[in-house]
Image (cartoon, helix red, strand yellow):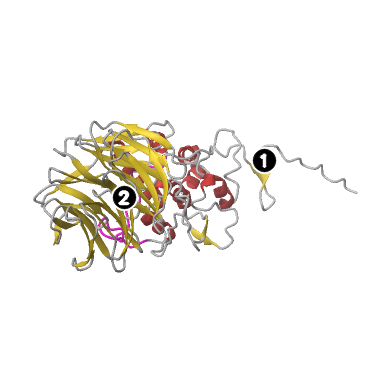
Amino acid sequence: MTPAPPMRMKRKDSIVSSTGRLLDVRNGCGDGRLDFLTYLPYEIAMVVVIYADYPAIATISQVCRSWSRFSRDNAVWRRLFLQQREWRTPRALATACGSRRLRHKHGDSGNGNVNFGNSPALSFSSSGMDTPNASGMGTPRVGDDTFLASDGSTPLTSRILSAYSGSSLRPAINLQHMVAPSPTMSTVGTPQLRSHADWRYLFQQRLELDRHWHTGTADVHILSGHGDSVYCVQYDYDHIVTGSRDRTVKVWDTNTLQCLRTLSGHDASVLCLKYDNTALVTGSSDSTVIVWDWATGTPRLRLVSHAAGVLDVAFNKEFIVSCSKDCTIKVWRRSDGKLLRTMAGHRGPVNAVQLHDNRIVSASGDSLIKMWDIKTGDLIRTFAGHARGLACVQFDGTTIVSGSSDQLIKVWDAETGQCTQTMRGHKDLVRTLHFAGGKRAVSGSYDQTIKVWDIQTGECTLDLKDVHTSWVFDVQFSASKIVSTSQDQKIVIWDFAKGLDISSIN
């Protein structure tokens, strides 16, 4: 009998492929190190790579040709983009889902988590495109904050910017030479959403936008048309709406910057306004609130009950809330304008009011912030800490941000009433604030400056000055713009998206 050949032992630097073939992995990257990733099936290798954060992806792109292919997979860049909480704007999320019917649910926690409903899980392919995976097994869920960074930390934008601009691990992927945007991605108006976006391209555009915010790189546009001080502003993709001491409301085209319509109806200064896609609500020194039909620009309701000027308004689908120099807050039924209740608890003019779910937050010249139940009128909590009267307040459901004539901005935990941050930098009354969740807030002051803040660190990240020549009355911001109004009659637009395509991510 012929003796059996001696058993060949598998070398420790080899692995057996799925076909039983012995593979040498010593030179997978050309320098003698073991490379298991290259010889794994592409889908399994991508389950490993998908957990990497941006600095790790930059490193992976430099290792070797096969690893560079992993770093270019569209699913990797989709996840890198969406794990940045402040980048998850409704339009970006709609792009992620490839549907206009995305349901964006904030939840009671207000932590930015997103419910994607029946959005399919993702799998990976060598083509680099996202494809449906019915089982979803082994695939991290978009929006799952368990996998925010490879070291378990929260992926702050500043960390990404640092990795992008200062690290020696610069990605071999040239982010400056991406596939040109699709013709459907118009930079003005509402784009056609693409089911398969180029997420590497979107990541580069959004990262560059954040760099503009850090450096103050912006185009500045000035609108003129009101005949007196401009007290209030709100804007969206298509319209900018302003109210003035000249007793008018003007509607401007966001893209052409042309005045589309002028509304007249108040007998004194228009001090405040809010609008949605069906109604515009304005408050005036004439002590009244007017509800306008958004489509036609005609008044539908005039709400009369305040004994002095209406200083701020807020509304949702059911209620309109107004506050006044008469020290009261009033709740009206939106459908017919019926006065439902009056809250009288402040000892000074109520200068600002916010509405979120069933909670009203008010700020007064008596230096106090109060939280109320809109359905019962009961006082829930009082926030004390400012040394002088309050001029403005913002509330996103969990966090309150307030500005005062003590020149301070304070951040509060809405549930505990504790002040979590105090920000210093203005040299006069903090007249206006905008905060809509996340870590960024923008303020305007009688010191004629506009400042951008990180409310987590308390740092002023950008100081805009030498544009307004008088008191700043109101400010609003989005992912790409700041719009401010002033006693100098100017409406100023800072556009940080200079040279960028942000139509699918703004």
* Quadrant in which residue 291 is drawn: bottom left
Check residue 14 in the rendering and tell me which mark sits there, or answer none.
1
**Outermost left residue:** 227
Label 2, residues with CA under 10 Å away: few <14, some 14-19, many ≥20: many
Q: Is residue 91 left or right of residue 46?
A: left
Residue 175 visible in the picture: no
Q: Which residue is mark 2?
A: 353
Q: Residue at 24%, 36% (x, y): give it.
A: 429
* Element assignment for label 2: strand
Q: Is residue 387 left or right of residue 375?
A: left
Disc nearest the viewer among 2 and 1: 2
Q: Residue at 54%, 49% (x, y): give it.
A: 46
Above or below, comparing residue 261 to residue 401 in the picture? below
Residue 213 image position (x, y, % from top left): 30, 40
| Amino acid on which the number 2 mark rests in the picture | Val
Query: Magenta segment: does it hold 377?
Result: no
Query: Magenta segment: does it hold 192?
Result: yes
* Element assignment for label 1: strand
**Outermost right residue:** 1
Above or below, comparing residue 361 to residue 388 in the picture? below
Q: Earlier in the sequence, mark 2 or mark 1?
A: 1
Front position in the image: 29 or 101: 101
Find the magenta span and give its range.
Answer: 172-193
Residue 474 image position (x, y, % from top left): 23, 46
Q: Is residue 43 left or right of residue 474?
A: right
Residue 184 image position (x, y, % from top left): 31, 61
